[in-house]
Image: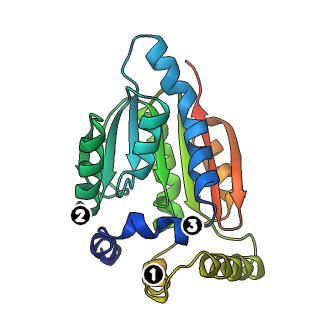
């Protein structure tokens, strides 16, 4: 896939530019961690090692943040870009976090788990809508009862006019944060492959896949954190 090569090429500088290209960085990732943490803490309290599947894990940022919030987790990082995962492995090794990495596409089979949390950041919007819906069904199947799925992602506006406005706001915000012309051009090149969907559609797909407690927990223009839980048996 062309998008995999683009992310592999950006692996060395991806983390450095993330805060400049994601204006709501702290709230966005912070909310994802807050939503994912409760079942991980419950697993620890029961004497188990909490398990996490990080989809489209990239350089491992979300797994690292979860490991900082809930020490003792064991994440499995799945990504189709080997160079991105190599960066993640270095970060996790230096932090002493035990991990597994899997080079695979999100459209393919998921590792069997089961997992206390499945998380994803800025990855699922690369899939078309049919594949998103299929992925949500497969995610539920690999969660433990009561486990949580959290998707922190780029989303589409509900109308073309609002989607255009999302882009205008993002451009103004990242320019104010000091994003360079090269960083913006690189982001635009990767965005050619984006297939974002509106939040209401995706929350409906989660409910149709069998998730409960489905909600959008945070949204700032084109960036949103949403998800749900697998019902207790």
Residue 182 sits in quarter: bottom left
At horizontal 40% and vertical 25% (from top left) the residue drawn is: 50
- The quadrant in which the N terminus is found is bottom left
Q: Spatial distance from mark 1 to mark 2, Cα to Cα?
A: 19 Å
x, y percent for residue 230: 56, 31
Residue 145 seen in the current view: no
Q: Which one is earlier in the sequence, the residue at label 2 or at label 3?
A: 3
- Contact flag, marks 3 and 1 (Cβ < 8 Å): no
Check disc 3 and report the residue beneath it. Answer: 22
Q: Is residue 65 above or below residue 42?
A: below
* Mark closer to the chain start, 1 or 2: 2
Secondary structure of the residue carrying numbered label 1 = helix
* Residue with the mark numbered 1: 183
Q: Is residue 198 above or below residue 118?
A: below
Circles 2 and 3: CB distance less than 8 Å?
A: no
- Report the residue that reaches farthest toward the top: 46
* Viewport quadrant of the C terminus: top right
* Closer to us: 199 or 74: 74
Q: Earlier in the sequence, mark 3 or mark 1?
A: 3
Image x and y of residue 88, in percent? 29, 52
CA neighbours of label 1 inside 10 A, class few (<14), some (14 to 19), many (20+): some
Badges 1 and 2: C-beta atoms under 8 Å apart? no
Which mark identifies residue 51? none
Task: Looking at the picture, tell me which residue is in the foreground, 140 or 192.
Answer: 192
Work out how far the residue at label 3 is from the one at label 1, CA to CA, in angstroms: 12 Å
Side of 41 relative to 27 (left or right): left
Residue at the image position 30 percent from the left and 68 percent from the top: 11
Q: Rounded to the nearest whole Å, what is the CA distance between mark 2 and mark 3?
A: 21 Å
| Front residue (pair 162, 97) | 97
Residue 158: x and y, percent?
74, 69
Q: Nearer the viewer, residue 142 or 30?
A: 30
Q: Which residue is mark 2?
A: 83
């Amino acid at each position: 896939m062309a998008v995999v090569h683009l992310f592999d090429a950006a692996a060395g500088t991806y983390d450095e530019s993330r805060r400049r290209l994601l204006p709501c960085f702290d709230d966005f990732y912070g909310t994802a961690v807050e939503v994912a943490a409760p079942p991980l803490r419950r697993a620890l309290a029961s004497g188990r090692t909490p398990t996490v599947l990080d989809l489209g894990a990239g350089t491992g940022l979300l797994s690292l943040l979860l490991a900082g919030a809930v020490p003792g987790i064991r994440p499995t990082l799945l990504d189709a870009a080997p160079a991105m995962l190599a960066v993640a492995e270095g970060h996790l090794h230096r932090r002493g976090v035990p991990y597994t990495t899997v080079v695979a596409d999100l459209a393919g089979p998921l590792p069997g788990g089961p997992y206390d949390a499945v998380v994803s950041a800025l990855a699922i919007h690369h899939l078309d809508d049919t594949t998103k819906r299929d992925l949500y069904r497969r995610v539920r199947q690999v969660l433990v009862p009561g486990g949580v799925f959290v998707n922190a992602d780029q989303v589409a506006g509900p109308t073309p006019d609002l989607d255009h406005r999302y882009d205008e706001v993002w451009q103004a915000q990242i320019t104010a944060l000091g994003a360079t012309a090269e960083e913006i051009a690189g982001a635009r090149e990767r965005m050619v492959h984006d297939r974002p969907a509106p939040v209401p559609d995706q929350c409906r797909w989660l409910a149709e896949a069998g998730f409960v407690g489905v909600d959008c927990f945070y949204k700032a223009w084109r960036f949103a954190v949403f998800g749900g839980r697998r019902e207790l048996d």
